[in-house]
Image (cartoon, coloured by chain):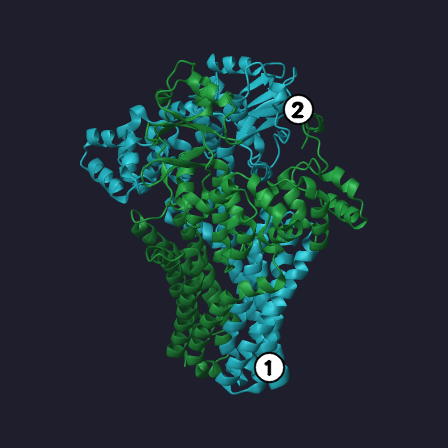
Chain colours: A green, B cyan
Amino acid sequence: MSDSVAHRQLAPEPEEAFGLDAAFVDEIAALLRADNRVRVKELVTDLHYADMADLLERLDSQDRQLLIETVRDNFNADVLPELAEAVRDQVMEALGFEDFAAALSQLDSDDAVYVASKLSASEREQIAARMPQEARLSIEQGLAYGENSAGRLMQREFVAVPNYWTVGETIDYMRSGQALPEKFYAVFVVDPRNRPQGMVELSRLLRAKRPERMKDLFDQDVEPVALDMDREDVAFFVKQRNLVSVPVIDKSGRLVGQITIDDIVDVIDEEAEDDILKLAGVRNSEVSSLYNAIISTANSRFPWLAVNLATAFLASGVVGMFEHSIEKLAALAVLLPIVAGMGGNAGTQTLATAVRALATRELDGSNAWRVMSRELFVGMINGLLFAAIVGVIAYFWFDDQLLAIAIASAMFITLTVAGLSGIVIPYALQKFGADPAASGGVFLTTVTDVVGFFSFLGLATLILL
Amino acid sequence: MSDSVAHRQLAPEPEEAFGLDAAFVDEIAALLRADNRVRVKELVTDLHYADMADLLERLDSQDRQLLIETVRDNFNADVLPELAEAVRDQVMEALGFEDFAAALSQLDSDDAVYVASKLSASEREQIAARMPQEARLSIEQGLAYGENSAGRLMQREFVAVPNYWTVGETIDYMRSGQALPEKFYAVFVVDPRNRPQGMVELSRLLRAKRPERMKDLFDQDVEPVALDMDREDVAFFVKQRNLVSVPVIDKSGRLVGQITIDDIVDVIDEEAEDDILKLAGVRNSEVSSLYNAIISTANSRFPWLAVNLATAFLASGVVGMFEHSIEKLAALAVLLPIVAGMGGNAGTQTLATAVRALATRELDGSNAWRVMSRELFVGMINGLLFAAIVGVIAYFWFDDQLLAIAIASAMFITLTVAGLSGIVIPYALQKFGADPAASGGVFLTTVTDVVGFFSFLGLATLILL
């Protein structure tokens, strides 16, 4: 933010240029507690809806309620989709069903469907009863599509013109101020049966002369997506083709909506977040966890830890098989953390790479064998290197040549298996329809721990005792 | 893809609708080896550039070279930015400097800068010498900005009009076919000194009447970004405000370029990938690793494993302090994997959540204390639960009440410390300017292993032996 002059020329705002200032949040909180509503109103009235959402998230629940009371009369509905779920529930409570329903009716159809999808069935019923019929029906239709489908993501508002229209007719139509969406990036061209034939981006439209025909301006690379297509597939396609919007069609091929780039940005963000958290064993539902209650967070993390406990006992059982060896040579126990740590880490490196490659479609049937053999070799190379390093260190630490040979061999075996499992496990999970990010880690560490402990303790027992 | 009719109406393509078909890749490979260039040309001539890039990535290096030879005469430059780095290097070799320079000159400035930034200094020199002066200068200017800066990301092509112009004048200017960018989403409005005063999205422009003045159509929420702003900050801002483009200004406030939503999509994607891979200990440079050579992949994974080996020896040293206890009671060694596994996993759950929250700006100074105390409690709750579970299992397994008490206490301590460290470590790293995703994991598992082993073996030694 080097140039403050240029900034002041544009929208001057009370908060920092990018993101909310902590001092601003504290000021609002203090004013709310001092019941200085007039000043609060002044300060928040020009806030962008995204910043208002941030502000609501940052305040504690008591101040949050006070703020809602203060802005109730001119509450900006656009704030709602931006809120973390736990915060939105509180805002709904503070607003009451009547005002919440009114706000929901003002949103674009995709945003309204998104917000409604996060409500409980009984809340949804209460709110639907207070909404105008048209808005209610549009939400019900949206909710009828699968959770991760294009239908759920799409916006029912779009601009479509017949294929025989000219550029001039299209522009005149838009100027006539018919019910157009708030923002749009392209005009769809449809045949007489309302099936999309192509899409003309606005920059293309603006460059064209008035008498040119819309059907001559098509972008050839645009294909419509079906209502039930997975949103990840839609995001992949839009990103791949650098599009700003895609038409959505129903079973008979008719244009029923559009999905725009700003929704795709959210999908990409959420899917990446999903993968990162699932790999770490945090459940999907915890995505906006910072605002969740302590008990529900603890609860959401419990299952993964329980699964890990079961696999840890498995690993522990392998160690238990060699209890007598350890009684004779406690040095074996001292070296166990090294075998487990290295195997788990090497496997996780490969696993994360594989999960990303599967998500970005870089890994599939056409190159799976090549990639697997590659990872096997990578595992073997690092296995050899670390076998040498660990062997030498163990030799000097315990002054025992055979122990050094046992740990070195186990290190090579474990890192090789880790490299191969890191790619085979997620690929196989995906093949069988499971989520490689969510369950890959458990399988992987189970394999590396069991193989690592068994090979180390087994070899040591064979050659040492 | 439920409706094939609607599909066929639009662009019929040789590959699957979304992503390349493995069979298609195999077919091309077979044709290339059979030297059937005519048929290959036919099949690939209508491929979208992104699919062509995919095809090049999927082929092995020999077939890749054959394909480049085949399409050399009408090689689409837009393929270049889409390629993984290792593949692009090969494509450059196959094309030769002359043709590669020609292709580079055809790209939009932001894409050309991106591709050039990935070349070695000597390659860049060779290629620059073969480019027209204008394109060369534009790349040199772009490369002068920091790697993650707005300047590097921006496109020098944009549409700007004086603030006193009307909508009609603006549209006429665009129709006159001046040097406009290939695609654009908004028109910037500038003052006489070329400082941006606002931005008018094209949908707004198209809805307005011809005599309306551009300065009355401004979007108030748009602020320009400085050339040296971090690209993550730009992405955050654009996403937060649901923008399609932002103006970029130099130190004197003059408009020098724009950053568009499609670049932002790439930034979001790359940053998420970075975080996920760094958390798993895969170096940043390995991002498009599937196409990297085995040796360089093994090499890129070595440092993290080496760091982990050092910390594993630290943990192992803690176990070594209690070698005599283990000699007396080998059951201690059997339970070690459980302490280490549970501590590491609980900490990783919190760490991943914290890294995401830092990346999305949900965690900062204004709520750090609240979030930390929350994670502490979450850790304590799960610590209590698992202390009970593990204690009971250990009691029945080893029939030893005191051993059960030792492991249960250690479990509570470890999970509590894991929860707190999972948030304090990444937050502190970020405060001190380090990357929480890249180094958080090492610190964390070192803490959980050391605390876990020390508390378990220490307590056991105290109360049992």
Mark sitting earlier along the chain (2/1):
2
Q: Is residue B295 visible?
A: no
Q: Which mark is residue A452?
A: none
Q: Between marks 2 and 1, how big is the CA–CA gap? A: 67 Å
Helix, strand or loop at disc 1? Answer: helix
State which quarter of the image contains the N terminus of chain A.
top right
- Residue at (65, 57) in percent of width and height: B424
Q: Nearer the viewer, residue A329 or A235?
A: A235
Helix, strand or loop at disc 2? Answer: loop
Q: Is residue B279 visible?
A: yes
Q: Which mark is residue B253?
A: 2
Mark 1 nearby-residue class (10 Å; few <14, some 14–19, many ≥20): many
Q: Is residue A22 above or below residue B165?
A: below
According to the picture, the residue beneath numbered tag 1 turns out to be B405
Image location of residue B194, percent across then percent down: 63, 18
State which quarter of the image contains the C terminus of chain A.
bottom left
